[in-house]
Image (cartoon, helix red, strand yellow):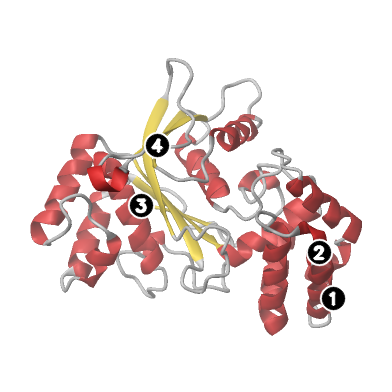
Amino acid sequence: MAGSTGARLPLQGGLPPGEALTGAVREIACDESGFSGTNLLDPATPVIVHAGVDLTRDEAAALISTLRSGFRFSPDEVKSRQFLRRREAAEAVQWFLSALRGRAHVHLVDKEFFLATRVVDLLLAEPSYAAGTRLSGDRRPAAALHRAGRAAGPGWAAFLAAVVEMLRTKRRDRADDRSVERFFAARDALRRHVGDAQAGAVLDALDPARVAAVQARLYAGDRTIPPPLEPLLPALAETVLHWSAGRRRVLVIHDEQSALTEDRLRRLQAVLAARDPAGPSPLAGLVMTDSRDDPRVQAADLLAGVARRMSGTPGDGPLRPLLSPAPGHDPGAVVATHDPNAVTAEQEPT
């Protein structure tokens, strides 16, 4: 057994580039924090954070070594949970972020807002791997639904729970599946407390036959529909679009993550390429690695964990450029960067 010998299992997933990469290609190391599988309503992890760093191995190793020299961390990895518990955490965080200035990017996704985008993009439109990203078009209906839902009281939580139950099609007894019926009962209960016209229009437009058809496609294993309860894929798309900047391709080096299968990544690659049919996809490929073997991924992991665990920090602290506004003010996916010349946050559509 691997556990008794110390051997590692082969890395799963990824999309290694099939050809020699030429032209402008940027290699970005990434990791996430807050992944909770299909349990998107876990109050302990309301956001998922995807971080990327543009560092060489030597630069990342020097950064981690400097952090480790002042703290007693594991010899394998520096973790944000340990990092933030230290007495000297504030000073260390400030140094860490300063060292990454212009070399790091963080994308945060509020999981409740992600579910609102799924209602709009998958249940009211043709499902696409562009769903949940800037490529899906107008996000104002999803933002209106999220804002009005949160103001509607407990019916919002019941509605989101019904969305999750209906879209979670694995390991379910389909013989007595009434999840679509329960979803519309929750929709009707929420609708009675929603006065916003745009949010009301979204709820009214939901059609039982169409919703049941989407669920049937999920049951049938239709791979053209993106995994409905997986926010990591649209977060990865936003990371790639940020680093590509419309001018170069991005080769992602990523800690192993079960959601990033080859089939899903190929579909995402094709969707990203649709922005410029004349050129190659900005996603050149994704190579899985073990974070213990790559200090760049360790740096991305630490950055993602710090951003998630300190996302509620107010004021002008050292993490402010990485943070979304307080929950409820901007429920959308927020893009933040250490580049002082870049926009620091993507505000909720108005």
Q: Earlier along the polypeptide chain: callout 3 or callout 1?
A: 1
Q: Is residue 294 in view?
A: no
Measured Cα–Cα span from mark 3 to mark 4: 31 Å
* Three-letter residue code for mark 1: Asp
Residue at mark 3: 338
Residue at mark 1: 188
Q: Residues within 10 Å of mark 4 (few under 14, many from 20)?
A: some
The label on residue 212 is none
Q: Earlier along the polypeptide chain: callout 1 or callout 4?
A: 4
Q: Residue at x 48, y 19 (%)?
A: 18
Image position of 114 (left or right of 59): right
Measured Cα–Cα span from mark 1 to mark 2: 22 Å
Image position of 105 (left or right of 119): left
Residue at mark 4: 11
Measured Cα–Cα span from mark 3 to mark 2: 51 Å
Measured Cα–Cα span from mark 3 to mark 1: 44 Å
Q: Is residue 128 in view?
A: yes
Q: Earlier along the polypeptide chain: callout 3 or callout 2?
A: 2
Q: Nearer the viewer, mark 2 or mark 4?
A: 2
The label on residue 176 is 2
Q: Nearer the viewer, mark 3 or mark 4?
A: 4
Q: Are marks 2 and 4 in contact (CB under 8 Å)?
A: no
Task: Name the quadrant containing residue 272.
Answer: top right
Is disc 2 placed on a helix, strand or loop? helix
Q: Nearer the viewer, mark 3 or mark 2?
A: 2
Q: Residues within 10 Å of mark 1 (few under 14, many from 20)?
A: some
* Three-letter residue code for mark 3: His
